[in-house]
Image (spheres, rainbow, N blue to C red):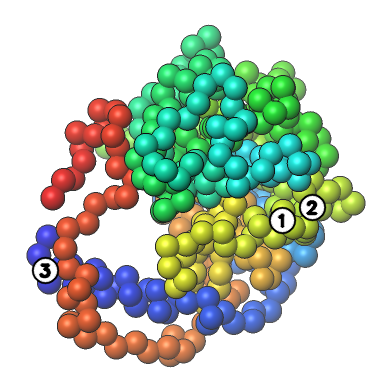
């Protein structure tokens, strides 16, 4: 990479930070239901086929209510079964992690754990190895600052008989952090898997059962489960997932794969079930009269808990900050075999949505996020002007590599050493 290219990249990054500073947030009017429906209908009718997405479900919540929910396209192409936001069950991939994080915070509310404590205090059958003086604290697991490397191998299996317990997987695969705990965001699955294992240890029940009893049932999320051997009453509602074959211009159904660590990605759910959960997060932990977390916990989930710099986006307990059009958004992404999902919250407006599609790909949801903000939260492009000289950018020249470097798997061979 040339020095000129590096300068251009760094200029773009700096301008993005300056232009998207949260201080610039503007007050926007609440989108009217009619305008919201018209906008969303027009967007997906135009974009669905263009991005080769078979089906989409979306639910939008505002001020404690579901203000819009709809399905677009097909839950199954072969049978022409349409997507239904109430009935169509999608795999949610890493959106699952926010449920694991909420479940862990519920334990903290009850005084069963202290999130500032070393996780090893609560583990009895094995201990987390750690080459750093700073312990892996529970709060590190909830903010993706645990320092563990990402898991790029053997994430899925084909047969349920191959599933191991969380304890077996962590004992065998969890290695020492590759970064000092609490020093930077190193997004991956090990931290959330360990948080899910803590739940099983503290409550002495399977992880799936705990989430069912403490989140799904209170919120009446009847079409949601972490059980990958789906209950009979849910099997017929599951959407078919697809890969799009560019060369042949056709969709090919994918296999139902089992996630080896359920707390990181095994959630199956509907858009409207997710609407109830989003309302609880935005409404101080309550959906109608049902409380799943207390107000202080809800605040921690919506407020920044870690950032490398005050002017850079950070992370809450469960969400990544995203600044655009002068708005502070919170994002929880999910991506897996044949699925792309996302929670997008605008806490300052008590507004949020859950989106899911039955094929992989980022283009459609990224385009929707931009169009949604441009439509309902437009900004004046002249609100801020920044001038940065080449001399200012010179100090950023150099070689860059990801912070989350692999150390214990074959993926280490891809490590871009300078």
- For label 2, the SS is loop
Say which quarter of the image contains residue 220: top right
Where is the N terminus found, in terms of image quarters? bottom left
Q: Is residue 122 above or below residue 295?
A: above
Describe the element under mark 1 as helix, strand or loop. helix
Q: Is residue 301 visible?
A: yes
Q: Say above or below: 344 vs 382.
A: above
Cα distance between the residues tagged 1 and 3: 45 Å
Q: Which residue is rendered at x = 39% and y = 33% of the image?
A: 176
The residue to which callout 1 is attached is: 298
Question: Which of the two discs, 1 and 3, labels the residue nearer the N terminus?
Answer: 3
Residue identifier under label 3: 3
In the displayed structure, 172 sits above or below 358; it is: above
Q: Position of residue 7 (x, y in %)?
A: 18, 72
Q: Residues within 10 Å of mark 2 (few under 14, many from 20)?
A: some
Q: Residue at x 42, y 53 (%)?
A: 183
Q: Residue at x 71, y 66 (%)?
A: 350
């Amino acid at each position: 990479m040339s020095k000129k290219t590096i300068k251009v990249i760094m200029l773009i990054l700096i301008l993005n930070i300056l232009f998207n500073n949260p201080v610039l947030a503007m007050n926007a009017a609440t989108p009217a239901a009619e305008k919201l429906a018209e906008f969303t209908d027009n967007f997906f009718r135009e974009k669905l086929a263009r991005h080769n997405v078979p089906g989409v479900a979306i639910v939008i919540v505002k001020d404690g209510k579901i203000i819009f929910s709809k399905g677009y396209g097909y839950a199954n192409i072969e049978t022409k079964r349409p997507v239904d936001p109430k009935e169509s069950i999608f795999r949610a991939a890493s959106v699952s992690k926010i449920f694991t994080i909420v479940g862990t915070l519920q334990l903290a509310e009850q005084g069963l754990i202290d999130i500032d404590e070393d996780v090893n205090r609560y583990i009895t059958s094995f201990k987390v190895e750690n080459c750093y003086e700073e312990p892996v604290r529970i709060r590190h697991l909830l903010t993706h600052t645990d320092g563990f490397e990402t898991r790029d191998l053997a994430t899925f299996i084909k047969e349920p008989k191959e599933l191991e317990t969380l304890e077996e997987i962590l004992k065998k695969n969890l290695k020492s952090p590759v970064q000092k705990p609490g020093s930077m965001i190193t997004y991956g699955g090990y931290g959330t898997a360990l948080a899910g294992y803590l739940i099983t240890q503290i409550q002495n029940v399977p992880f799936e059962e705990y989430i069912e009893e403490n989140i799904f049932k209170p919120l009446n999320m009847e079409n949601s489960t972490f059980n990958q051997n789906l209950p009979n009453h849910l099997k017929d509602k599951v959407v078919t997932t697809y890969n799009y074959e560019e060369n042949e211009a056709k969709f090919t159904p994918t296999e139902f794969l089992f996630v080896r660590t359920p707390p990181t990605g095994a959630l199956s759910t509907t858009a409207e079930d997710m609407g109830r959960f989003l309302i609880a997060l935005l409404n101080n932990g309550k959906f109608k009269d049902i409380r799943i977390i207390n107000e202080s916990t809800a605040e921690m989930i919506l407020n920044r808990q870690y950032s490398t710099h005050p002017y850079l986006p950070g992370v809450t307990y469960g969400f990544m900050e995203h600044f655009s059009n002068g708005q502070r958004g919170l994002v929880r992404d999910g991506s897996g075999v044949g699925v792309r999902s996302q929670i997008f919250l605008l806490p300052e407006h008590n507004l949020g949505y859950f989106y899911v599609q039955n094929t992989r790909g980022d283009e459609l949801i990224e385009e929707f996020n931009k169009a949604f903000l441009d439509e309902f939260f437009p900004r004046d492009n002249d609100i801020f002007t920044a001038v940065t000289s080449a001399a200012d950018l010179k100090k950023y020249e150099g070689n860059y590599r990801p912070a989350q470097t692999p150390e214990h798997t074959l993926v280490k061979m891809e490590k871009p050493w300078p």
